[in-house]
Image (cartoon, grey):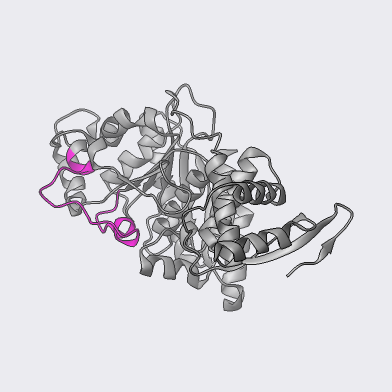
Amino acid sequence: MTVPYDPDDREKVVAKLPAALRQELKVRAAELGVDIKDAVTEGIHAWRAAPPRPPVDTSGGSSFSTYVPTGLYAELKGDCKSRGIAFNQGLAQAIRLWLDSSPSPRRTPPSTKEARRLIFGNQKGGVGKTATSAGVAEALAEAGKRVLLIDFDPQCHLTKQLGYPMLGIDDPSLAKHMLGEGKGKLRELLVPIEEGCFGGRLFLLPGCKDAFLLDAKLATTRHVRIKETALEKALEPLEAEFDYIVVDCPPSLGYSMDTALYYGRARDDEAPGTSGVLIPVLAEDSSADAYDMLFDQIEDLSDDLEIQIAKLGFIVNMYDARKGYIATSSLDSWKSIGEPPVLAVVPERKEQREAARLKQPLLFWAPDCEQAEAMRTVATAVNG
């Protein structure tokens, strides 16, 4: 299917390509400052001159369109026919060749600076801490950052929703390392998340049910200040390897939450707002009550320890204006707070539930959905 495109003497090409390939092309082109149409054109020319390429998985493809120089579409179509492959496959191979030949400029060795720490917290369960922490981590990795995503909730929803096994109750875990009982190095527990364009940049520290015991053990420890510093001390050896460390916290106001809040405090050499707390909420009153309790915990900890903990912003999750006045007025109330700001409104859609059911990252399963775009909005805000 072609449509003349003047004045650049190009024609429109429409094909069906898998979402992951389209998203990888979009991200890589943005990283390199190249128009998508020029990237595709370069890929087609390279593919036509190259020997036969390995097939690309094009299952589940959806509509993709761009513009190429007039006549190139017919030439590509003819080459596909002579090679005995479908046009969609030929175009996918051409794009894959361009991606392989145009590495991300951000795939550089990690710096030695401290990682920025993003703590996802709210005393109320069911507000989407797991979904938003994972989505924002994926968006940061998609943008070229090295990200460690930590399941700090003993319910282990993050680990299970991404399709990884929980750590065994008797195995080394983050909680054991926090208490000085861990064997080996914490780094050995990290799991790479390779789907989509996250490869080599996104890692998960899986959860373990032993985190249920963490509050009780922290409460009875004799070590001075370990209640607040335990998480920081455990994660310190990993910080130089990552740009961001994202912590999915439990719906709790206990000692474990104190350690997470302390970990997200502003350090002496950090600019304001570099690290801090992101607060997922719903557009309804119980989220406001839960935030009041979290606010008090943050303020009390800040006063007691003479530290600064930045509240980076609200993420209003699972928003549906069709619920009427309760939803719309609650959203207005969150926005009216002003500081911290509402960073994004994540709509109530099926894609996140589908991704969790299929144990896939949202930005891999449905990279073009509204929820994925909201995660990128938050990532852009905190990365700014």
Position of 270 relative to 282 (above/below): above
Residue under the point 41% across and 37% down: 264
Residue under the point 79% across and 60% down: 11
Q: How many marks?
A: 0
**Residue 243: horizontal and vertical position, in percent?**
45, 34
Residue under the point 57% across and 39% down: 102
Residue located farthest toward the front when viewing the structure as drawn: 82
User: In this rendering, would 142 be left or right of 328?
Assistant: left
Residue located farthest toward the right when viewing the structure as drawn: 7
Quadrant where the C terminus lies? top right
User: In this rendering, would 137 be left or right of 68?
Assistant: left
User: In this rendering, would 103 be left or right of 236?
Assistant: right
Q: Quadrant of residue 62?
A: bottom right
Q: Quadrant of residue 357?
A: bottom left
Q: Is residue 288 visible?
A: no
Q: Which of these two is toward me, 145 or 173?
A: 145
Q: Which of these two is toward me, 139 or 288?
A: 139
**Residue 107: horizontal and vertical position, in percent?**
49, 34
**Which span is picked out in magenta?**
152-176
Quadrant where the N terminus lies? bottom right
Magenta-drawn stretch contains 335: no
Q: Is residue 163 visible?
A: yes
Position of 227 relative to 91 (above/below): above
Q: Which of these two is toward me, 179 or 243?
A: 243
Magenta segment, principal secondary structure? loop
